[in-house]
Image (cartoon, grey):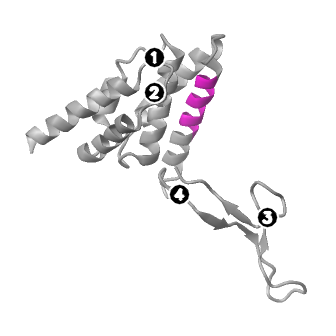
């Protein structure tokens, strides 16, 4: 059992190293999948966060964006015990750094870091909504007409996007 954990940890470390690079290429799916599976095998993201602390995120905007992308995938698909609340300050600091620099990708990294901090804070405050929740079709009911009043007895439906008159909202799956 200990041997399997060390192999899983080594595979996860190798995947982290190969996925979060400064190359202008997307993160390969197999490395992202290995990182996510590694969090499920270890029951959290201790290996990821211990390696992520040593990454030189302030040196390259592409590296920082890929880090944000992998963290976003972990929050969405990783083990529920990812425990990212202790790292919110460093993510926010990285976003502030890249937001102040006038780099090609700096503004994008700053916005992505802000999104991650908002997502982490939201899921800490509202623990009923899990980060990995997905919806195919949702009816959003704003309110219904009381039974003793005149008018329609059907609930009033309000749409979110893309059209104002549409009552059915479709959310994309990851």
The residue lying at 27 percent from left, 33 percent from top is: 12
Mark 4 → mark 3, Cα distance in angstroms: 20 Å
User: Which of marks 4 and 2 precedes in the sequence?
Assistant: 2
Image position of 104 with respect to 137: above or below: above
Viewer-nearest of discs 2 and 1 = 1
The answer to which of marks 3 and 2 sits earlier in the sequence is 2
Viewer-proximal residue among 158 and 34: 34
Task: Name the residue located 55 percent from the left edge and 41 percent from the top edge.
Answer: 119
Q: Which residue is mark 2?
A: 67
Answer few, some or many: residues within 10 Å of disc 3's Cα (few below 14, many 20 plus, some between 14 and 19). few
Q: Eyeballing the image, is 137 above or below 42?
A: below
Q: Give the mark nearer the N terminus: 2 vs 1.
A: 1
Q: In the displayed image of the protein, which residue is found farthest to the bottom?
A: 148
**Residue 117 on the magenta span:** yes
Q: Which of the pair 55/136 is nearer the observer?
A: 136
Disc nearest the viewer among 1 and 4: 1
Query: Is there a contact, CB below 8 Å, between mark 3 and mark 2?
Result: no
Circle 3 sits on which residue?
A: 166
Q: Which residues are magenta?
A: 108-118
- Main SS of the magenta segment? helix
Please name the residue shown 9% across and 40% down the image: 2
* Residue highlighted by disc 1: 22
Q: Which mark is residue 134?
A: 4
Mark 3 secondary-structure assignment: loop
Q: Residue at x 31, y 24 (%)?
A: 51
Q: Residue furthest right?
A: 150
């Amino acid at each position: 059992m200990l041997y399997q954990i060390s192999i899983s940890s080594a595979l996860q470390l190798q995947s982290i190293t190969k996925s979060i690079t400064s190359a202008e290429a997307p993160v390969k799916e197999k490395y992202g999948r290995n990182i996510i599976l590694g969090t499920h095998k270890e029951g959290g993201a201790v290996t990821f966060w211990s390696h992520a602390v040593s990454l030189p995120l302030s040196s390259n905007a592409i590296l920082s964006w890929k880090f944000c992308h992998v963290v976003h995938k972990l929050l969405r698909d990783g083990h529920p015990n990812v425990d990212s609340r202790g790292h919110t300050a460093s993510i926010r600091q990285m976003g502030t750094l890249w937001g102040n620099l006038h780099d090609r990708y700096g503004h994008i990294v700053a916005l992505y870091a802000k999104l991650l901090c908002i997502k982490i804070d939201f899921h800490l405050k509202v623990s009923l909504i899990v980060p990995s929740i997905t919806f195919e079709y949702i009816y959003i009911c704003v309110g219904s007409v009381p039974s003793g009043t005149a008018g329609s007895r059907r609930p009033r439906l309000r749409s979110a996007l893309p059209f104002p008159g549409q009552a059915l909202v479709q959310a994309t799956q990851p």
